Image: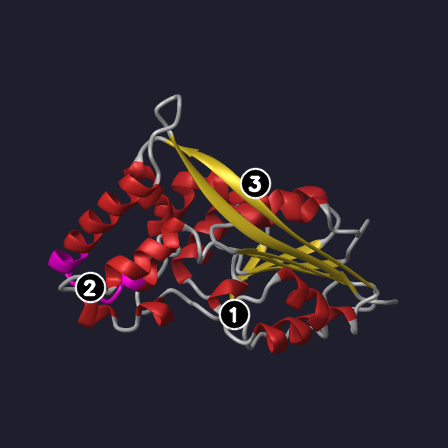
């Protein structure tokens, strides 16, 4: 994707995005890490959680997005942030915690990627990962359907590729790629159900993340048409509940793996 991330759009739904980050951190079995790395730190919401839990640790936030890093530095000026790609990053010092919240789903070959990251840990260190696992949900299935059915289809290209199909393993797959390496592996999958005001709110939430590969190749006219068609499909797929709100199911996979001392 050529366009940079939009921190302001991302943080509109910060509570929904930070809740899984907090639940992941709560399961990290470390008392006093010396070095914690927030891989794919975004605007710093997850980095703030790590720094609050481990005030004695050196906490570093890494991201590929200059805009996200600028937002994170403004939020947490006392911490260090740097540009780095999770797929190729190698630390100068082995971290006690590598924390990757909602970032690795953008990268391919998880059967190689996660063992590589795990191997970067210091003895006794922890790899903690959370990834959205919603590609089969109506929100993301409809992205692919709308992408392939309108005048914008040629600009977007293969909807399956834009939709990142085939990148995620199932929970047992993540267990298997780490179990032979780790002292302990904890894997679980949870579906969050977010209360959204209307279909437009659902579109706004996913526009900052999963919808980006579909929108980035489009010109303004194409983007407007795509969004209108997608919102209409979302409106039908997520009908109003008893209170008039929409309920967005958002499954996520969590992985916590600890290296032996």
The percent position of residue 168, horizontal first and vertical second, equals: 53, 66
Name the colour scheme: secondary structure
Q: Is residue 220 magenta?
A: yes
Q: Quadrant of residue 143?
A: bottom left
The percent position of residue 165, horizontal first and vertical second, equals: 43, 68
Kindly check if marks 3 and 2 are in contact, taking CB atoms under 8 A apart as contact.
Answer: no
Measured Cα–Cα span from mark 3 to mark 2: 32 Å
Label 1 sits on a secondary structure element that is loop
In-image side of 71 versus 225 (left or right): right
Above or below, 161 against 58 in this view is below
Location of mark 2 (residue) = 218
Q: Is residue 116 magenta?
A: no
Which residue lies at the image location 51% right of the left edge and 71% below the top edge? 85
Q: Is residue 66 visible?
A: yes
Crowding at mark 1 (Cα within 10 Å: few <14, some 14-19, many 20+): some
The magenta stretch is 214-223
């Amino acid at each position: 994707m050529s366009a940079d991330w939009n921190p302001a759009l991302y943080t509109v739904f910060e509570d929904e995005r930070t809740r899984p980050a907090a639940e992941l951190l709560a399961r990290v079995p470390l008392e006093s890490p010396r070095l914690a790395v927030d891989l794919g730190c975004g605007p710093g919401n997850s980095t703030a959680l790590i720094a609050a839990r481990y005030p004695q640790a050196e906490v570093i936030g890494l991201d590929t997005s200059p805009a996200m890093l600028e937002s994170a530095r403004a939020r947490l000026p006392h911490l260090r942030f740097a540009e780095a790609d999770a797929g190729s990053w190698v630390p100068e010092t082995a971290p006690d915690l590598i924390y990757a919240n909602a970032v690795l789903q953008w990268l391919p070959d998880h059967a190689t990627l996660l063992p590589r990251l795990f191997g970067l840990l210091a003895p006794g260190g922890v790899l903690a990962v959370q990834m959205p696992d919603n590609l089969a949900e109506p929100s993301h299935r409809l992205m692919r359907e709308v992408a392939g059915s309108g005048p914008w289809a040629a600009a977007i290209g293969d909807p399956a590729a834009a939709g990142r199909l085939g990148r995620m393993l199932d929970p047992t797959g993540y267990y298997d790629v780490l179990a032979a390496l780790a002292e302990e592996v904890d894997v679980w999958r949870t579906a969050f159900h977010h209360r959204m005001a209307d279909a437009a709110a659902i579109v706004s939430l996913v526009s900052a993340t999963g919808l980006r590969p579909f929108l980035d190749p489009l010109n303004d006219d194409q983007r407007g048409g795509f969004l209108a068609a997608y919102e209409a499909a979302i409106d039908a797929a997520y009908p109003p509940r008893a209170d008039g709100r929409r309920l967005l199911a958002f499954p996520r996979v969590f992985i916590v793996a600890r290296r032996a001392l």
